[in-house]
Amino acid sequence: VDADGTRVFSLEAQSGTTEFVPGAASETWGFDGAYLGPTVVAERGERVRVDVANALDVPTTVHWHGMHLPAEMDGGPHQMVEPGETWAPEWTVDQQAATLWYHPHPHGETEQHVARGLAGLFLVRDDAEAALPLPREYGVDDLPVIVQDAAFTDDGRLEGAAQGFAGRLGDELIVNGALGPYAEVRDELVRLRLLNASTARTYAFGWGDGRPIEFIATDGGLLEASVDLDRIVLSPGERAEVLVRMSPGERVTLRSVMTPEAAGLQPAIGGMNGATDEFDVLELRAADALDPAPALPERLVEMPAVATDIAETRMFRLDGFQINGAAMRMDRIDHASTVDTTERWIVENTSSMPHSFHVHDTQFRVASIDGAPPPPELAGWKDTILARPGTEYALVMRFEDYADPDTPYMYHCHLLWHEDQGMMGQFAVV
Ligand code: C2O
Ligand code: CU
Ligand code: CU
């Protein structure tokens, strides 16, 4: 914390080597290390600054995915950090407790920078979440689960995965930077913060023994109440917080069993998009004696009704790696939204493949999907959604606090190869 009360973090993008397989060194990138980056934790209301240094030999950026902040601090393609330079964005954290993340956003290169390992979690905490008897001891009963897919050579070195329509799909999972991970736990109640940090792959997470997923939080924070689901589908960029109740000595494995149906695909093309793939994600191993779990209240937080004071309705048609028939241009701002107003964004996927639609600066609510109310797992605050083929999503969002006619925010497909191809647009808040 510096003299005026700002909490200061630092992150250095650097290159290094990682042995995913012992004895086989892969060239990787990371923040403050060779792969991934430290988990940043800040409180709501806190003024924060992050000194982002670039020790790579190419320019990069760091974007705060899910964060409400001024456009100049957003870390998109307009805030490049040149090799040897430091960029020091600062803002006041003002949103509810949530699992956010950070990653590079250089135009046309995002897939490569993230796939090499540049990504980390950014946790926001607040009083409402702190007042609940939820597990929150990081690394003990509150565990990050950063899921990436990758391909390896026969001798265990990272290589570029095969290119498909979705992007590159690897046939192995790297979880928190490791292959085949497990976690030993000594609490009855464990919280997992799932982040799909993959560049292209969508997962359907569930428990290997068939117990339900106890789902408590979406991208933007806690749901009103926990919901039990068979599985939770996360497309690239999405997060979910889940609880799991352990018995002494037991082992249980989080798995992803994807189906064409979960991706919204015809079975015939599911295989090409990884929609028939199955993975073990993380094994939990419970100690023989476990700390008891307190009972959770039925209501976690207040969830307001979806806003109806719509000032503007906009259409976003996803097709052909473009949005509304146009590819991203750095020198074109596609529209301006008015600060302190609510908008409805109709996102229609008219292509035959799934996309992942993400909006910077704000958390939105899914008002409807093809005119019907969203399922419980989409009833909370979101910044990224899986956009299934032939499906129309009505999103309601508010732009607050920060106006800047000259610096845009982005909306884009979070399949990073699609984003790099130009499936992205820019909006200013004025
Ligand atoms: Cu996670 Cu524009 O990005
Ligand atoms: Cu983002
Ligand atoms: Cu896409």
Image: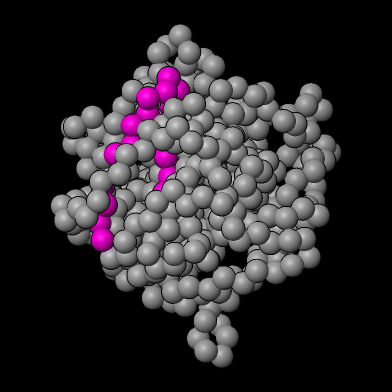
Left-right relation of 429 to 10: left
- Image coordinates of residue 333 in percent, x first then y, are 47, 52
Q: Is residue 31 above or below residue 244?
A: below
Q: Residue at x 73, y 49 (%)?
A: 29
In this rendering, position of residue 222 left or right of residue 259 = left
* In this view, 78 is above or below 242: below
Looking at the rendered image, the quarter that the N terminus falls into is bottom right
Q: Main secondary structure of the magenta part?
A: strand
Q: Is 297 placed above or below 84 here?
A: above
Quadrant including the C terminus: bottom left
Q: Residue at x 56, y 55 (%)?
A: 76
Residue 24 inside the magenta-drawn segment? no
The image quarter containing residue 373 is top left
Q: Nearer the viewer, residue 164 or 324?
A: 324
* Location of residue 173 by image quarter: top right
Outermost residue on the front side: it is 332
What number of labels is visible? 0
- The magenta segment is 341-359
Residue 338 location in percent, x, y? 31, 61
Residue drawn at (52%, 66%) of the image: 72
The reply, left or right, for residue 95 in relation to residue 145 is left
Residue 343 inside the magenta-drawn segment: yes
The answer to whether any part of residue 157 appears in the image is yes
Judged from this view, the residue extending furthest toward the bottom is 3
Residue drawn at point x = 19 percent, y = 32 percent: 371
Task: Residue 232: give x, y in percent of width and height.
Answer: 37, 35
Q: Horizontally, is 17 left or right of 127 in the view? A: right
